[in-house]
Image (cartoon, rainbow, N blue to C red):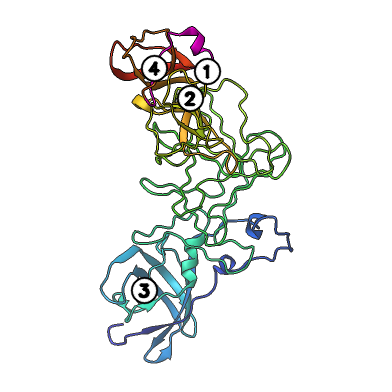
Amino acid sequence: MSRHHPSLSVAAVVLSLVLLLSSQANPARGQEAPDALQGTDATDAALSTAFSYQGRLQRDGAPFNGTCDFQFSLWDAATAGSQKGNVLSLTTVAVAAGLFTASLDFGNQFPGEARWLETGVKCAGDAAFVTLQPRQPLTAVPYAIGLLPGTIVDNPSGNGFKGVAHTLGKAGVVGTNEGSGGYGVYGASADGGGVVGISINWVGVYGETKALASTGAAGVYGKAIGPSGMGVAGRATEPDSIGVKGSADASGGVGVWGESAANTGVFGLTKSASAFAVWGRNTAGGVAGRFDGVVQITGGADLAERFVVTGDAAEPGTLLVIDGDHPGQVKPSSGAYDTAVVGVVSGANGVQPGLTLHQDGVLEGDTQVAIAGRVYVMAEALSSPIRPGDLLTTSALPGHAMKATDRERAYGAVIGKALTGLDAGTGFVLVVVNLQ
């Protein structure tokens, strides 16, 4: 074609991939879970990445008839740019009334970015290929290749894949695995979230299992295989929100279950001095916590109750007696051998209460008072040194304990037995609180 320059115009891109863009109707289903989770329809055979391309070839303004050789190449720009994939060469393509059809297969070169087709043609009598201008933009149908089964969607600067649903009960993305031991949807990340779910008015991630037997099946399953990872983690950043919540609607069910073969089944941690690492509540007035086994407390050493202290706040280690002028309240001791002695303010020398009892709205108080167990008490050895094993009672020195040397007066006035001694002056003595 040294004297005649044929021109190629795109008549249409035929829909050889139309199966990727259509779907079969499903019968109506209930709303137990999103409809998309109820089942999917599968095609019998997977499609290739080829698509059909049809064009019109003219010579001197008239439709060409005969056979020609074609070279097709894929580009990322209308001019210049970079070639994508290999050059496709087709020989002796029939051209009738100017029309020709070619099957093109550039592989997975359609990640969602624009593509242009460049065509070279050499017909009978031509010495060389003639590159036709301009390049032809490819429209949406070839991009359905990106939805073929097994296709990897790769976007270096944004979302790899995004699905949007606008109908109630439908899903933006659906993954189904009909094999054994595989995944319906699998997400992995080297340094971020493998799978992230966000919802404005419902759950961010929804998991459901319909297993009928005790197979260990789980609606949501988390596994940590590293030395410090977490199988499932929940985080609440707003007041009154919940990081992880489990609920059971049937008798015998469990809202949250923690199990370990060689370590802690359930672990609670808080970094606030006024919050709770583990909180159990029974709104029906029943039992809020039950332990089938030995209960071990390592956070403190005494059993305390909350009391209201008359007057100024009492410091830890203060010996307290019942305040006869204010029923239900206590005050620092102020006389020797006081039979109204009740306990010691917890917390002295860093020994915190192991267990604190009180009833909201009924028996209130802001001071933790040790009524049993080990606690440090302020003591004086002004009249007699204190030795381990001595009985302790109230002293004339306010808020202090002393050795009970008068057995008759000590009856009913003993706070407990000394575990450590005090030779002289004042100081702290470790005592086992045991009123007698």
Mark 1 against mark 4, which lies toward the viewer? 1
* 332 relative position to 244: left or right: left
Mark 3 against mark 4, which lies toward the viewer? 4
Q: Which residues are magenta?
A: 398-413
Give the residue drawn at x 32%, y 12%.
422
Res. 297 visible in picture: no
Give the residue type at disc 2. Answer: Gly
CA gap, disc 2 and disc 3: 88 Å
CA gap, disc 2 and disc 4: 13 Å
- Which residue bears the numbered disc 2? 343
Above or below — where is 56 with respect to 88?
below
Q: Circle 4 sits in a helix, a strand or a loop, which is it?
A: strand
Q: Which mark is residue 430?
A: 4
Give the residue drawn at x 53%, y 50%.
185
Mark 1 against mark 3, which lies toward the viewer? 1
Give the residue type at disc 4. Answer: Leu
First-in-chain label (3 vs 4): 3
CA gap, disc 1 and disc 2: 8 Å
Quadrant (top left, top right, bottom left, bottom right) of the C terminus: top right
Pick whichever, 58 or 204, lies toward us: 204
Q: Which mark is residue 435?
A: 1
Image quadrant in which you'd find residue 419: top left
Image quadrant in which you'd find residue 215: top right
Q: Circle 2 sits in a helix, a strand or a loop, which is it?
A: strand
- Which residue bears the numbered disc 3? 116
First-in-chain label (2 vs 3): 3
Q: Position of residue 249 (x, y in %)?
A: 70, 45
Q: Position of residue 400 (x, y in %)?
A: 38, 22
**Is the Cβ of the residue at disc 1 closer than 8 Å to that at disc 2?**
yes
Give the residue drawn at x 42%, y 39%.
311
Image quadrant in which you'd find residue 190: top left
**Is the Cβ of the residue at disc 1 closer than 8 Å to that at disc 3?**
no
